Image (tube, rainbow, N blue to C red):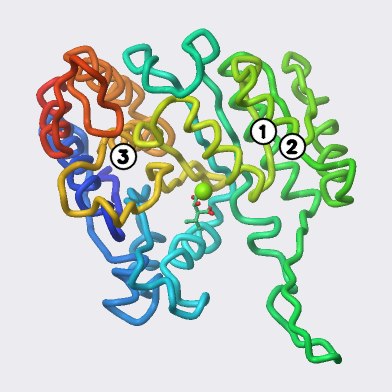
Amino acid sequence: MTKKIAVLPGDGIGPEIVAEAVKVLECLRADGLDIEMNEAPVGGAGYEASGKPLPDDTLALAKESDAILLGAVGGYQWESLDISVRPEKGLLGLRAELELFSNLRPAILYKQLADASTLKPEVVSGLDIMIVRELTGGIYFGQPRGVRTLDNGERQGFNTLVYSESEIDRIGRSAFDIAMKRGKKVCSVDKANVLECTELWREVMEHVAKDYPEVELSHMYVDNAAMQLVRAPKQFDVMVTTNMFGDILSDCAAMLTGSIGMLPSASLDANGKGMYEPIHGSAPDIAGQNVANPLATILSVAMMLRYSLNQVVMAERIEQAVEKVLDQGLRTADIYSDGMQKVGGSEMGDAVVAAL
Ligand code: IPM
Ligand code: MG
């Protein structure tokens, strides 16, 4: 049966990197992949089209699709809008409406890019971490939230960190399931020494672990985890953590690999439906100049094939094609080093298609 893919380019460099990923999908379609692609605006583009960062038609398309390919959202021109209609709300709305609670953010160091990391090669070579971030709960969505005026006239901002047992349980199971296919180690990151909510998090993780006797569970406070990520990142296999801690730690882990321009992500619901996007943002400063690295988005397509479309062989072909263009010495500006061949984003996309 034809699989439906919603293509949501978004803002900034989103459209140009998504265009390269679509080239890859078109190439696979010519090779027998049975897909249909439909494009719709989201983020700032959604706001311009309909006054909402997540237009109704875009949400409807996302709901009826088997998978979603997203570029990035956000830009300077929308920063002064009310928070309720800012581009980021388009992304958060998709995550919430589609219940994409499990966010997989791999941090892999490609051997060809060992020099691109700011850390010493021996610290990062061979790095392969999977961060599993809870994506539809925690302080990002907790109620009550807002800014209120106190009796003395002073304003007070407030957000709520809240997790129910079932939310912790299901993200825990995601992490353990993935660990079973990898190094069989899960490190759960919390702040159980201060926050009751994450004390419960720790307790539920212990409970989930009982169903996975082969997996070794450890716990780490988030401040220490940030430190360990830059001190000795190879100690980690799978890390599982809350929405906000995962937001922060995944940027940190991304930079271990040299460029955030290389890292894909998957956001999955309970049935394997997913949204796939690079973990980097919309980079409005370099938009429209054909310098953005499309590899993170292309690698997101590989994750889509693996997790939502059940096409593991095609996923591996994409990953091998990316390795091949790196072996050929092609580099976008973000991963460029002396002696390599600097190329633009579209040339990089073409090279991946050629390698496929
Ligand atoms: C991410 C981003 C988003 C987040 C923003 C754009 C809302 O930083 O996907 O990590 O905070 O989740
Ligand atoms: Mg982030």
Q: In this view, does 242 lie to the left or right of 164?
A: left
The residue positioned 35% from the left and 67% from the top of the image is 76
User: Which dot, 2 or 3, sits closer to the camera?
Assistant: 2
Give me the disc on residue 261. Answer: none
Query: Which badge, 2 or 3, is on the more N-terminal residue?
Result: 2
**Residue 80 image position (x, y, % from top left):** 44, 77
- In 3D space, how far apart are the residues under numbered discs 1 and 3 (Cα atoms)? 26 Å
Q: Is ligand 2 within 8 Å of the beta carbon of the residue shown at mark 2?
A: no
| Residue neighbourhood size for the residue with mark 1, other residues' Cα within 10 Å, grouped as few (<14), some (14–19), many (≥20) | some
Q: Is residue 327 above or below residue 156?
A: above
Quadrant of image for the C terminus: top left
Q: Which amino acid does label 1 sit on?
A: Ala
Q: What residue sits right under mark 3 in the picture?
A: 297
**Residue 102 image position (x, y, % from top left):** 58, 43
The residue positioned 68% from the left and 77% from the top of the image is 146
- In 3D space, how far apart are the residues under numbered discs 2 and 3 (Cα atoms)? 30 Å
Q: Which amino acid does label 3 sit on?
A: Thr
**Residue 119 image position (x, y, % from top left):** 50, 20
